[in-house]
Amino acid sequence: MTAPGTVLVVEDEPSIADVLAIALRYHRFEVMTAGTVREALALAERTRPDAALLDVMLPDGDGRALGRELRARQPELALVFLTARDSPAEMVGALAFGDDYITKPFDIDVVVARIAAVLRRTLPRALDPARAGGTPMADVIPQQPPLRYGDLELDETTYSVHRAGRTVELTPTEYALLRFLVRNGGRIVPKEQLLRHVWQYEHTPAESTVVETYISYLRRKLDTLGPPVITTRRGVGYGLA
């Protein structure tokens, strides 16, 4: 299957870059990640991505200035900015030369949908495997051993999930949440930590019910294939049985 496009993710926070890469690869995008302006420029020069998802605040420069430099080198490149700043002036400034602007905290599935929409709008040829210059070369995703917990198995190369040998269809957000719980083994993970890692909430909204909602989604899909696997510690968080 031809990838719908190649995306350069430039984000200096490893956990955020990881979640974004998981979601985009889950939807068959080819993904490269960089944590600095210098790394991003080198990757873009070597691979010529179809789109760049840029954090505005980077340790060695400004994401908007990076966007201008990338666009100067590759005029057809789609630019999407990711930032915690949401003032009208910031948005207008970024949209003056970028294609979209996403504020933190964000919903992973919305980010993927907007990247796909930008590529359809700005680079329809990104869907054509015969486009000029050939298909860009992305970083090769190394084969990794599956993550296992009990009868759960998560393949981090194909982003597939199995329980008791049977496939479980998850959305990118559900996958990221389950992956984080599996990586923490039998430990109870506080709700605030889940919100920061999976949804990128820097300040936890007291009224937020997003974790509870997605935990219920996971239970609905996993518990039909075996005994309940997700446990709740009231007032604390969630873990695996």
Image (cartoon, helix red, strand yellow):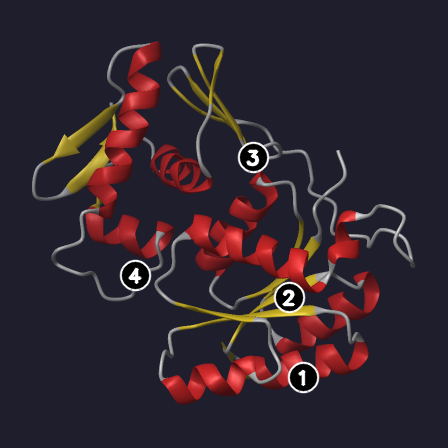
Q: What's the distance in space between the residues labelled 3 and 4, CA to CA?
A: 24 Å
The mark lying in front, picked from 1 and 4, is 1
Residue 220 in the image: state x and y as whole percent: 28, 22
What is the quadrant of the C terminus in the image?
A: top left
The disc, 3 or 4, on the residue closer to the chain's N-terminal end is 3
Kindly report which numbered mark, 2 or 4, lies closer to the viewer in this rendering: 2
Categorize mark 1 by other alpha carbons within 10 Å: few (<14), some (14-19), many (20+).
some
Q: Given contact means CB atoms under 8 Å apart, are the residues at marks 3 and 4 in contact?
A: no
Between the C-alphas of marks 2 and 4, the distance is 22 Å
Q: Secondary structure at mark 3?
A: loop
Q: Residue at x 76, y 39 (%)?
A: 2
Label 2: which residue?
52
**Which comes before the other along the chain, label 3 or label 1?**
1
Label 1's element? helix
Question: Which amino acid lies under the numbered mark 3 shown in the image of this protein?
Answer: Glu
Q: Nearer the viewer, mark 2 or mark 3?
A: 2
Residue 62 visible to an observer of this rendering = no
Residue type at mark 1: give it: Arg
Residue denoted by label 1: 68
Residue at the far left: name it: 235
Q: Position of residue 52 (x, y in %)?
A: 64, 66
**Residue matched to label 4:** 201
The answer to whether residue 125 shows anywhere in this view is: yes
Q: Which secondary structure lies at badge 4? A: loop
Disc 3, disc 1: CB below 8 Å?
A: no
Alpha-carbon distance for marks 1 and 4? Answer: 28 Å
